[in-house]
Image (spheres, rainbow, N blue to C red):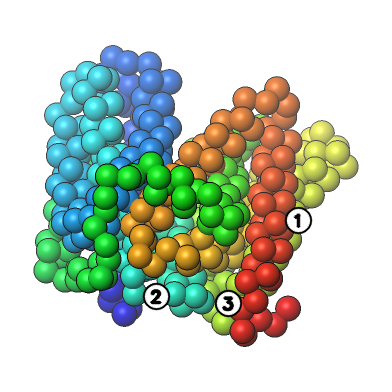
């Protein structure tokens, strides 16, 4: 089972690698393609948007045709998208490459989470989801540094060569080692897709816990979006110092995720939601106190921003895997479609919350504090709902 989870991890790494690896090369891409930096930066949001919307299509395909065929198709699309980025000479072609990669990740992400749901349930599934979500945090920690080193040696196209080669290796591994986990008794998907979506979205358990992931994703996106202006602008960190601080937090989230996975059997899923919500609230309180209590000169220190962020990210580690397992639990016969909707709610809801916070005409730290508060509230609502599900091993 461990090898199975590692293969799924390699599959889902395609998403964060596609987002973070080329971040240091954006100025060079802008210059070489004769575009504006805002246009190239927008490809990050475009990638995430396609990732969220595309799962509405890839989910039913995974249930209809199976996990392995859709995974292979996604890998081929990812390789093509990386190749298009390598040969791009205009911003329009580069944007098209990002669209292809986003569509590809729609397929691979749904496959990975569907495979977990096919093989596991309850606490075991929560631990698996937590492992996947937690380990992914090593990518924001290391990918920008790797991308910068590759670009320094061979130019801005080198990170996309890396993505293409990585995708080829994963494609070979999938073809050889990934089993088809789609249940043999799974009914064929009929032409009632919108009715299926509506029925799943109308499930109270699904929406309650899927919204938890939207809140945590909104917190993460808001933090990442505001970090450059807060840390390199207000705190005046150098780009290298920024990368180090950013990376340390990534490693911390990964460590916190392993802690959550270790204790989930002892604590139970409802308690994990309570711990996560409390840490999110602590992060919100830390930002507010730093903004209100500390003198202006101290407010701009990088730790005033990063310590509350670390608290909230700890909450994310305890909440995401737990919430995902609860959201998918009622849909063993429609794991692909339900997984797609979880991804859609998480990405679309998180992006909307993040964009709302960023657009507020207030200090960045206050915007982030608001999103942390929303995440805390959603977590507490979900925790209350989880108690009603009455797990046999519940300790609280």
- Helix, strand, or loop for circle 1? helix
Q: Quadrant of residue 118?
A: bottom left
Q: Residue furthest right?
A: 293
Q: Nearer the viewer, residue 245 or 238?
A: 245
Q: CA distance from mark 1 to mark 2?
A: 32 Å
Q: Which residue is mark 2?
A: 120
Q: Which residue is mark 1?
A: 282
Q: Nearer the viewer, residue 308 or 392?
A: 392
Sort mark 3 into few (<14), some (14-19) or many (20+) by Cα contacts within 10 Å: many
In this orientation, does residue 135 appear?
no
For image coordinates 33% across by 21% down, the residue present is 30
Q: Which of pointers 3 and 2 lies earlier in the amino acid sequence?
A: 2
Q: Is residue 27 left or right of residue 34?
A: right
Q: CA distance from mark 3 to mark 1?
A: 21 Å
Where residue 249 appears, as percent x and y from the top left, is: 55, 55
Q: CA distance from mark 3 to mark 2?
A: 15 Å
Sort mark 2 into few (<14), some (14-19) or many (20+) by Cα contacts within 10 Å: some
Q: Which of pointers 3 and 1 lies earlier in the amino acid sequence?
A: 3
Where residue 314 appears, as percent x and y from the top left, is: 62, 61
Instruction: State which quarter of the image contains the C terminus.
Output: bottom right
For image coordinates 49% across by 75% down, the residue present is 122
Q: Which residue is mark 3?
A: 264
Sort mark 1 into few (<14), some (14-19) or many (20+) by Cα contacts within 10 Å: many
Asked if 172 appears above or below 191 in the picture, the reply is below
- Helix, strand, or loop for circle 2? loop
Q: Nearer the viewer, mark 3 or mark 1?
A: 3
For image coordinates 27% across by 40% down, the residue present is 103
For image coordinates 24% across by 58% down, the residue present is 188
- Helix, strand, or loop for circle 3? helix
Q: Which of pointers 1 and 2 lies earlier in the amino acid sequence?
A: 2
Q: Nearer the viewer, mark 1 or mark 2?
A: 2
């Amino acid at each position: 089972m461990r090898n199975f989870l590692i293969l799924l991890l390699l599959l889902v790494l395609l998403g964060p690698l596609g987002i973070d690896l080329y971040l240091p090369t954006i100025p060079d891409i802008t210059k070489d393609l004769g575009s504006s930096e805002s246009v190239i930066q927008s490809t990050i949001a475009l990638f995430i948007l396609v990732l969220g919307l595309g799962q509405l299509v890839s989910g039913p395909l995974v249930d209809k045709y199976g996990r392995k065929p859709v995974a292979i198709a996604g890998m081929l699309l990812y390789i093509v998208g990386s190749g298009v980025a390598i040969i791009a000479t205009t911003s329009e072609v580069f944007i098209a490459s990002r669209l292809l990669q986003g569509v590809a990740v729609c397929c691979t992400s749904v496959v990975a989470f569907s495979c977990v749901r096919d093989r596991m349930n309850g606490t075991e599934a929560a631990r698996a989801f937590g492992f996947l979500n937690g380990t992914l945090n090593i990518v924001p920690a290391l990918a920008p540094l790797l991308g910068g080193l590759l670009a320094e040696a061979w130019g801005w196209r080198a990170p996309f060569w890396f993505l293409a080669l990585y995708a080829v290796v994963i494609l070979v591994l999938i073809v050889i080692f990934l089993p088809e986990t789609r249940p043999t008794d799974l009914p064929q998907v009929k032409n009632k897709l919108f009715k299926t979506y509506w029925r799943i979205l109308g499930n109270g358990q699904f929406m309650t816990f899927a919204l938890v992931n939207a809140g945590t994703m909104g917190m993460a996106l808001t933090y990442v979006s505001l970090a450059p202006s807060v840390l390199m602008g207000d705190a005046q960190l150098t780009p290298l110092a920024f990368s180090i601080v950013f990376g340390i937090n990534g490693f911390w989230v990964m460590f916190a995720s392993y802690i959550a996975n270790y204790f989930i059997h002892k604590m139970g899923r409802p308690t994990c939601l309570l711990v996560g919500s409390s840490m999110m609230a602590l992060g919100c309180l830390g930002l507010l106190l730093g903004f209100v209590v500390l003198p202006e000169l101290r407010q701009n220190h990088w730790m005033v921003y990063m310590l509350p962020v670390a608290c909230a990210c700890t909450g994310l580690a305890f909440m995401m895997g737990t919430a995902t397992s609860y959201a998918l639990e009622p849909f063993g016969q429609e794991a692909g479609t339900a997984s797609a909707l979880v991804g859609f709610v998480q990405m679309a809801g998180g992006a909307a919350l993040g964009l709302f916070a960023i657009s507020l005409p207030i200090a960045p730290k206050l915007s982030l504090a608001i999103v942390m508060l929303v995440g805390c509230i959603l977590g507490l609502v979900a925790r209350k709902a989880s108690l009603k599900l009455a797990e046999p091993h519940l300790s609280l």
